[in-house]
Amino acid sequence: MNGKLFKPKLLYRKRISKMLEGIFEAPLFFLLSSIGYGKTTAVKTFLSSKKNLRYVWFSLSTGESDELWMWQKFCHSLEDISLELSNRFAEYGLPKNAVDLDRIISILKKNVTERTVIVIDDYHENKSEYMNRLITCIAGERVSNLHIVLISRSIPEIPIEELILKGLCIELSQDKFEFNKEETIELFVQNGFLLSPKEQELLVKNTDGWAAAIYLALLKYAEDKTVEDISNVTRLVKTAIYDKFDRETQQILLKLSHLDSFTLDGAVFVTGEKKAGRLVSKIKGNNCFIRYDNKSGTYFLHAIFKTVLLELFNTADMDKAALFSRCGDWCAKCGRHIEAVDFYHRAGCYERILDIFELPGAAELIDKAPNIIISAFNSIDKETKLSRPMAYITYIYSYQVAIDAEEGAKLLYEAKAIYEADDKLVDKEQILGGSPLRKVFFNLIVYL
């Protein structure tokens, strides 16, 4: 690293913890504020301090557009509190009607027997109206022992005001999270900096209660003992944090910026740097911009830091396709095949996508993330798809069953005609009907 990073002591704000006790006073607890107000850190710290409490943390991904894939990831996160709950939610799928909702509520009432909190972070990324309906329904049912926390930068399509009036929801707004003057000054005092009255007034004016700005101002003050206008937080994150790292560390961080979370082994694999794990641990120990989750054993980049890194990545002189390919390899190695397909698509590694579709269970992937899978296959040229008949037929089969039977039949007719006319096709009998299941599959198109 080029410059020594100052490791600040964080300020415990008792009043925030007291307000967060409201989580247990209503079925739904809604936190609303812009980025950088410490919502996520405050809730995690609060819940971690509680005994006899089960809680699960689910973060929505940036640009989340595939609601079925989102649901599958949400179900997987529930394994932390109940494997049966996770499996049954995944089995029934995202509830889309009253019958589905009743079934989900029944499952919750049966399986949630201890005090349980489900946190959904970055809920502003949710694009599913069905998820909004589910949250509203759960709140209305007052499921015993269950409390849901939504953390968002914007108001979701959920009747928050109506739920508040009915006593089913408590909202904690941005102004409650803002640092007041006393807290801002106390943070500096706690870290050994006694500001002059003039510096105090300038600091409070410049940061305006924004936790991220105050934290960055503290780092800046530790370096040069000045309180400046830090309204451009993105620039300050770059100068106060990113620029302090040597080029090797910067490159490692840029490569990790596309992962929602990662283990130390994953960091080493994706970056190709043996020292990546050690560097991540060191950075995490020195500031709040890399977080570690004890339950999952994974690391996360803070949203502000991630935003800056992604902006820098876009202009970085780096082999981006090679990086996405390594990300795909890591996900595939971990059995995270949908994420692998997404990365391979971005890398243009279409043969790797077809490799995945030759694996057992590949036909189920389109059910879990149709947008990701269809988009990837639409990007593969027809010749390449036809050159891998087992993978291509598996895709067509899953597309026909899960998405569009008529269009799937057309694709199958076309593929079958090409394969039947190809005298050099290896394993031709197996491809065209070597198993009873495939024979039935090909025969079905006659009736579609």
Image (cartoon, rainbow, N blue to C red):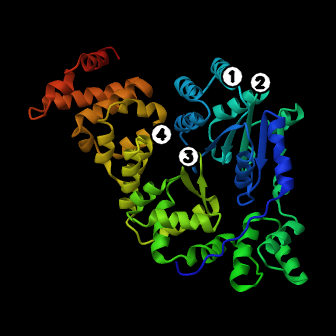
> Which of pointers 4 and 1 indicates the residue nearer the eye?
1
Disc 3 from disc 4: Cα separation: 27 Å
Q: What kind of residue is marked 3? A: Ser
Q: Secondary structure beneath disc 2?
A: helix
Instruction: Tell me which residue sits at (86%, 78%) in the image.
Output: 200
Residue 5, image x, y percentages: 62, 76
Residue placed farthest to the top in the image? 447
| Residue corresponding to mark 4 | 371
Mark closest to the chain's N terminus, 4 or 1: 1
- The alpha-carbon separation of the residues under discs 4 and 1 comes to 28 Å
Q: Closer to us: mark 4 or mark 2?
A: 2
> Mark 3 — residue?
296
**Few, some or many C-alpha atoms within 10 Å of disc 4 (few <14, some 14-19, many ≥20)?**
some
- The answer for how far apart the CA atoms under marks 3 and 1 are is 27 Å
Q: Residue at x 67, y 42 (%)?
A: 120
**Left or right of 73: which side holds 21?**
right
**Mark 1: secondary structure:** helix
Which tag, 3 or 2, sits closer to the chain's start? Answer: 2
Mark 1 vs mark 2, CA separation in Å: 8 Å
Residue denoted by label 2: 141
Q: Residue at x 37, y 66 (%)?
A: 319
Choose top left, top right, bottom left or bottom right for residue 434.
top left
User: Which amino acid type corresponds to the residue marked 1 in the rendered image?
Assistant: Ile
Relative to 356, say whether 418 is above or below: above
The residue identified by callout 1 is 105
- The residues bearing labels 4 and 2 have C-alpha atoms spaced at a distance of 32 Å
The numbered disc on residue 219 is none
